[in-house]
Image (spheres, grey):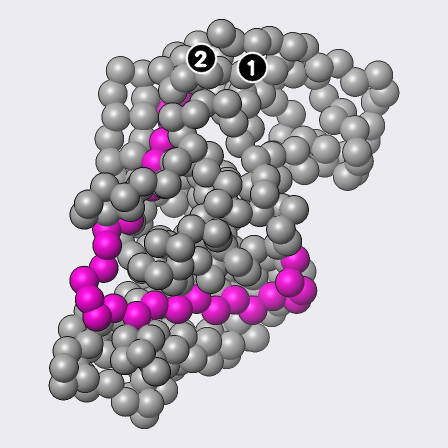
Amino acid sequence: MVKTVVIKPKVDINKVNTHILPVDFEYYEPRTLRELVELLDKLGPSAKILAGGTDLLVQIKQRAVEPKYVVNIKKVRELDFIEDRGDYLAIGAVTRLRAIEKNSLIAEKFTALHEAVRAMAGVQIRNMATIGGNLCNASPAADTAPPLMVFDAELKIVGPGYEKVIPITQFFKGPKKTVLKYNEVLAEIRIPYPKPPTGSAFIKIARTAMDLAKVNVAVALRVDEDDYIRWIRVTLGSVAPTPVRARSVEEELIDKRFSEEIVRKASRLVVNDISPITDIRSTAEYRREVSKVIVRDALLIAYKRVRGV
């Protein structure tokens, strides 16, 4: 059953951060995925989805968004799970980051994702924030996006009367923009198990441990018994309008024999794939330079993990 409450603040707050929610909205709590999609279809584009609330509530307090309807999806149990499905691991969109962090299978098979989640804010935030919320907020600095991209993750999207599965590379359209329509919801993330031997790594550079990334990078690679790189992915965040694959680096390294020298040279090519800006957290120049360094470092770490060093 959907519960509805009209929230009416007693004071008028200017557009500054506050502990008070300064706008009127209707509040809903659907309990099933079908109910959720039907509700979104009925309410229209004025509805906003509340998952962990670590982004949306801040935006409402600052009046960056003023929704007419808020739809809390935390009680839709169909969206909260981590399941081994044979060929891939499935994660529900409202699965808390803390649950992902503590999952031993993710730590073992998808190390870069495990490291990305551990690098996000503090335990209090990870106990509330969801993986689907991190993706749907579509921040260029979203920490879960690069590792999911290097593992070739797919996203299950559900709309009224249909569902579809798309590569995560097709999901982001720009800062705060995704392919989701107003009556669609991200239901689950599917991550194919990498073929052995595969190593991965995640590195984040930020002003403080609690801050968003100045730059982040995830890599995954597979080498054969003679050390030739047979499969590789390199993805960065906070250096372009969306998380971006460093294809210049990948193309330079594929089918090459792994060495620190070739990795160092290839990592410099990352500047061909990124378009950083200067903002409150960093300068474009710093982002370009540090990207070369952390791409190199992440590749070296991933290789050592392949070899069990």
Relative height, residue 261 to residue 281 (above, below): below
Disc 1 packing (10 Å; few <14; some 14–19; many ≥20): many
Q: Is residue 187 left or right of residue 116?
A: left
Disc 2 packing (10 Å; few <14; some 14–19; many ≥20): some
Q: Is residue 140 visible?
A: no
In space, the residues marked 1 and 2 are separated at their CA atoms by 9 Å
Where, quadrant-wise, is the C terminus in this rendering?
bottom left
Q: Residue under circle 1?
A: 28
Q: Which residues are magenta?
A: 181-210
Residue 153 appears at what percent x and percent y? 29, 49
Residue 134 appears at what percent x and percent y? 49, 44
Q: Earlier in the sequence, mark 1 or mark 2?
A: 1
- Label pair 1/2, CB-CB below 8 angstroms: yes
For residue 248: magenta?
Answer: no
Q: Is residue 162 left or right of residue 52?
A: left
Instruction: Pick whichever, 227 or 139, lies toward us.
Output: 227
For residue 185: magenta?
Answer: yes
Residue 57 appears at what percent x and percent y? 65, 33
Relative height, residue 9 to residue 199 (above, below): above
- The residue located at (51%, 77%) in the rendering is 290
Amino acid under disc 2: Leu
- The residue located at (59%, 39%) in the rendering is 128
Instruction: Pick whichever, 155 or 308, lies toward us.
Output: 308
- Local SS, label 2: helix
Q: Is residue 131 left or right of residue 63?
A: left
Amino acid under disc 1: Tyr
- The residue located at (33%, 90%) in the rendering is 260
- Disc sitting over residue 39 in the figure: 2
Residue 113 appears at what percent x and percent y? 41, 57
- Asked which quadrant contains residue 5, the reply is top right
Residue placed furthest toward the bottom: 261
